[in-house]
Amino acid sequence: MGREPAGASELAASLQGKGYRMRNAADLDPLLDQVGDARYVLLGEASHGTAEFYTWRAALSRRLILEKGFSFIAVEGDWPDCYRLNQFVQGRPTSGGSAREVLRAFERWPTWMWANEEVVVLAEWLRQHNKGRPAHRRVGFYGLDVYRLGDSLRRVADYLQQHRPSAQVAARRAFGCFEPYGSSAEEYARATRWVDASCEDEVVALLTEVRRTASLPGTEREASFDAEQNALVVKDAEHYYRGAARRRGTFAITT
């Protein structure tokens, strides 16, 4: 169990006792003071999809970036979709004409968690903030979820095909292992509960090949980073689905 930072409970009690109502960005000062020199800040919300939470969370994120030097935002979203938005906020030439256009890629339910007006405003601000800054100083936007196993697997296969076709055999084996279950990760997870079989070896081998490819001279750093993260999504998703089925029996997975 994590321990609250010193003074966090007192700060919360103080704000609640005063009926504290935030009206502008300066009202975030007590929270910025509490952050201090922390390297990571976790921002939650009392409900998904409430405009006020998204607005204030974005305001706090902007201040953390400007005043505390934070370098990336990691969200409860899928890696492939969020990486498209990351390309936009970092000003990549082929990333899309607007944040609203890029956010249409968020197709997995619930789309409104990230494809909403408040995130559009934040993404456009991030793009302007990053403009003219060297690549290593640009703020990124990344997703931490592992629900897009199939999408990530396809992106890894495309990367290997482009950069090291000889390693495609690992991608084909991974595709072949999941193929009997169609596009349903739930079916795969349920099957592993009843039979002693899994795709664990295939996804670990795939990650190994991606890392070998990334280490080759002349391999584009950004493309390798994206491919490795997608390979990690595939590995972690396989482990998650298989473990969840064995722990819980029947369950629902949104893919």
Image: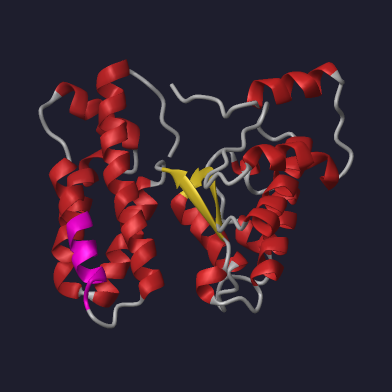
Left or right: residue 120 versus residue 229 is right
Depth check: 29 or 244 in front?
A: 29
Depth check: 248 or 63 in front?
A: 63
User: Relative to residue 24, is residue 101 depicted above or below?
Assistant: below
From the image, give the main secondary structure of the stretch colored magenta. Answer: helix
The quadrant where residue 156 appears: bottom left
The residue most toward the left is 196
Residue shown at the point (30%, 54%) measured from the top left: 231
Q: Position of residue 188 (x, y in %)?
A: 26, 34
Q: Position of residue 166 (x, y in %)?
A: 14, 72
Q: Position of residue 111 (x, y in %)?
A: 60, 43
Q: Is residue 128 magenta?
A: no
The quadrant where residue 172 appears: bottom left
In which quadrant is the N terminus drawn? top left
Q: Which residues are magenta?
A: 207-216
The residue most toward the right is 23
Residue shown at the point (23%, 71%) measured from the top left: 215
Left or right: residue 195 versus residue 145 is left
